Image (tube, grey):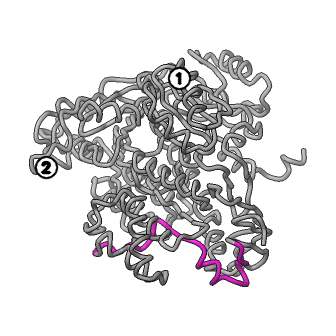
Amino acid sequence: MSGWAIAVRDLTKRFGEFTAVEGVSFSVAHGEVFGLLGPNGAGKSTTIRMLCGILAPTEGAGEVAGHDIAREPAAVRSHIGYMSQRFSLYPDLTVSENLEFYGGVYGLDAERVRGRKRWALEMAGLEEQEGQLTESLSAGWRQRLALGCALLHEPEVVFLDEPTAGADPMSRRRFWEVIYGLREAGVTTLVTTHYMDEAERCDRLAFIYAGRLIALDRPEALKDSKQAGALVEVDCDAPAAAVESLQGEDWVEHARLHGGGVHVVVKGAEGAQARVEDALRAARVEARRVEPVRPSLEDVFDSLIREAEAPAAVGAS
Amino acid sequence: MPEMYGDPAIEARGLRKLFDGVAAVDGLDLAVLAGEVFGLVGPDGAGKTTTMRMLCGALPATDGAARVAGFDVVVRPEEVKRRIGYVPQRFSLYPELTVDENLLFQARVHGVVGKTFEDRREQLLSLSRLGRFRKRLTQDLSGGMRQKLALICALIHQPEILLMDEPTTGIDPVSRGEFWELLLGLAAEGITIMAATAYMDEVERCRRVGLLYRGRLLIVGTPREVRREARLTLLQVTCSPLRAGQRTMQGLAGVRWAEVFGDRVHAAVERVEIEDGIRRALEEAGVEVTAIRPIEAGIEDAFFELVRRRSEELG
């Protein structure tokens, strides 16, 4: 048995001619909150379905909660929890009835269902909504109830596929408090999200693009890596003109409108600010402020994708 | 050539909407300048959708007035509708029609015909890079492409103003980035854009943002101004165990809130000088402190703080 909660090597899934996931390898430690990010269609859901023992990999191997995902998919399924934004809570059942229903699905005895139901209600902050119909709950509450259902059988590893989609920022913060509570109890979480502020809350992030893993690190380390080039912010009255003059420069990775100003990514970090200032002066674009800023995670992923899409010739030159 | 922001394109004075006696929007004052990209944020139920619907003339206000593109939305709704494009929260498209057919349908609704329509259609398809997919059924498009189609459908009659209600919800960050690139390009050509959003990276791309809470704007300003106004000092505390550290800090005077963030705790404090006090309290509680350093608060932290402050005032 490996020391990891999740470990996969060269995981590949083909559907006919189409390769959805290609040679993906990573390991997740016990108690880690691990984020899986990437555009829609990049292979996130296919990866999760293989890790959950729902879909057999074409190639490669993996272990989840100590069980082989290809040889022991049933054992994997009984040791994990799974929640997706398409999670099927029954809207016409009460909060309590939904929990009892899932207790039955997981084969828990009556006493254990009672105990776990109390736990789930408290965790989700739904004690006072116990008798309420699920359809009358707000998105944030429904999501915490769905999480409670996915955790009834006390899984060691939990997969959350866009668990907070469509919820407001307050509810999303609350959801993450619950995730950290699980982490404290030693539960391992693999989560996908389109919210970058949530990605920042993960211990580590894996970024998948076109079926391949193109980055894996702590959020802070990803932002510090110079891979992304240097990001410079320009505050000026003529942002469109600034973008136009900068886009033509061969040392500019890209320039785009950002708020009332411009964000420029400069290849190579050296003297980025001065180069931007000079270029704007030459183009007679007056700038109030030109200063280097720390890239956001979104900037980092944007650069990684551009790099992944760039023709091979660029790398060879 | 300097780009200037013009007169107000969208103006609301004391706008109010009651549903069964409950105020969804409660005395809203707002001015969005021509050519501006304005973001509207706020928790669920704050009144974002109600505001948007009143501004585009789809919902009558209980009280107050709104002028859009220079016309009163109640007195001259037809003039307003001619000049605005509206992208609602849920899809406004027909899933069983192709891209081309959805565009044609919207054009007919707005009376855009003949060569004007054909030219406009080609221009919009090329702008959105949806040309390759023009014969595809809308239901077979990805979420990101569908939203681009909803956007260009709203642009078919060349509106001056775009009103959008969380147009990118559920769309991945890369597609959202492309969508916003498109929006900012439109703004650079002089179109005024007002968009409700729940994504903080989108907020950062707006020129100004307004935070709506319980039917009122708590603050309006550039993202930078909003962060400044929140007067929020965040301390990043690396300690172990984390949750014990969080709980200890939550109980300290001068700490507004503390939350676990990755492998650290973020504590919102009134003054940075409290650092020594925090360190002592943590050590007394048996929590091991590795580092405490001030960090820049994000725009979401600022909104969170402003909403907290307001809800404390309201009790």
Q: Position of residue B194 (x, y in %)?
A: 36, 39
The residue indicated by pointer 2 is B19
**Which residues lie in the magenta part?**
A66-92
Seen from the viewer's position, the closer of residues A153 and B164 is A153
Q: Residue at x 35, y 54 (%)?
A: B89
From the viewer's perspective, tell me whether residue B243 is left or right of residue B311. right
Give the quarter of the image for residue B52: top left
Give the quarter of the image for residue B39: top left
- Magenta segment includes B219: no
How crowded pointer 2 is (Cα within 10 Å; few <14, some 14-19, many 20+) is rated as: few
Label of residue A193 in the image: none
* Circle nearer the viewer, 1 or 2: 2
Q: Quadrant of the C terminus of chain A?
A: top right
Mark 1 element type:
loop
Q: Which amino acid type is marked by label 2?
A: Phe
Q: Residue at x 59, y 43 (%)?
A: B242
From the viewer's perspective, tell me whether residue B75 is left or right of residue A101. left
With respect to residue B273, does A201 lie above or below?
below
From the viewer's perspective, tell me whether residue B238 is left or right of residue B50. right
With respect to residue A216, does B38 lie above or below?
above
Mark 2 element type:
strand
